[in-house]
Image (tube, rainbow, N blue to C red):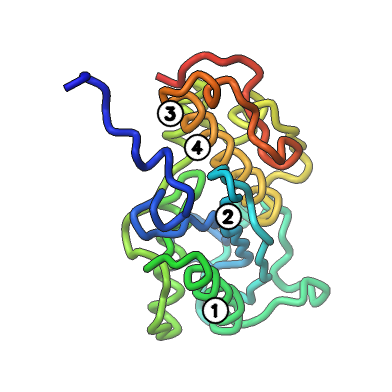
Amino acid sequence: MTGFPDFGAARARTLAARFRGFLPIVVDVETGGFDCTRHALLEIAAVPIRMDEHGWLYPGHTLHAHVEPYPGSELDPKSLEITGIDPHNPLRGAVSEREALDQILDEVRQAVRRAACQRAVLVGHNAGFDLGFLNATAARVGYKRNPFHPFSCFDTVSLAGLAYGQTVLGKAAEAAGLPWDDSQAHSAIYDAETTATLFCGIVNRWRALSLLDPALATATPPGDDEVALPDDSAPLI
């Protein structure tokens, strides 16, 4: 016994091995309020996480849909002011909830299959909020093959708090050395892509520091323009 934890998962060269058969998919939703049982889903973006041949994570292609408020849903003016979304603007190209889920979740299911995983696991910043709206929408439209785990998730609020001492997405991104533009915040695409890069950076840094291999611990993962890592080499814990 060395007293060290088993970092076998950190050495994994496949996503299925790294996350116990789950494929991380970053999801961000923009909504008409905070209650997933009453307020409308207005926008959703999803970013499947990928792994290169060396075992480093990077964000995949972004999936996105604008969503029409479902009949009888509520729209909180304060929430609309924050997101800047005009739900009734025809230029949004919004689709029904069912069409949006078909569009996004079919692609997620294919990504899960390509990664040889069993199921998707949602990654989000305040992930419970996004997962709540996703599950409520799926239940409302009778979506039967939701590829996401119904309650497990990775939350970058906790991860960023551990890694950088920051829990607000913009502050965490800046602490990680990522660009942040307040004018683009609360766009599902922008927030999902930022969260995906943040998640990959934290997991990659943990991998580099946890392999107990001096060569890898000082190595910079490829694709640094996509997955930003902290400038220092201080341990995360």
- Residue highlighted by disc 4: 203
Which of discs 3 and 4 lies nearer the camera? The answer is 3
Which of discs 2 and 3 lies nearer the camera? The answer is 3
> Residue 131's x, y, as percent?
43, 59
Q: Residue at x 40, y 68 (%)?
A: 135
Instruction: Report crowding for label 2: few under 14, some 14 to 19, many 20 or more residues within 10 A (C-alpha).
Output: many
| Label 2 to label 4: alpha-carbon separation | 12 Å
| Label 2 to label 3: alpha-carbon separation | 20 Å
Marks 2 and 4, the one that precedes in the sequence: 2
- Residue highlighted by disc 3: 211
> Residue 199's x, y, as percent?
54, 41
Q: The residue tagged with tag 3: helix, strand or loop?
A: loop
| Label 1 to label 4: alpha-carbon separation | 26 Å
Marks 2 and 3, the one that precedes in the sequence: 2
Instruction: Report crowding for label 3: few under 14, some 14 to 19, many 20 or more residues within 10 A (C-alpha).
Output: some
- Residue highlighted by disc 2: 50
Compared with 6, 217 (above or below) is above
> Residue 15's x, y, as percent?
46, 54
The amino acid marked with disc number 4 is: Val
- Could you say which is closer to the camera, residue 37 or residue 100? 100
| Marks 1,3: beta carbons within 8 A | no
- Residue highlighted by disc 1: 106
Marks 1 and 4, the one that precedes in the sequence: 1
Marks 2 and 1, the one that precedes in the sequence: 2
Q: Quadrant of residue 37?
A: bottom left
- Could you say which is closer to the camera, residue 33 or residue 169? 169
The amino acid marked with disc number 1 is: Asp
The amino acid marked with disc number 2 is: Arg
Compared with 156, 29 (above or below) is below
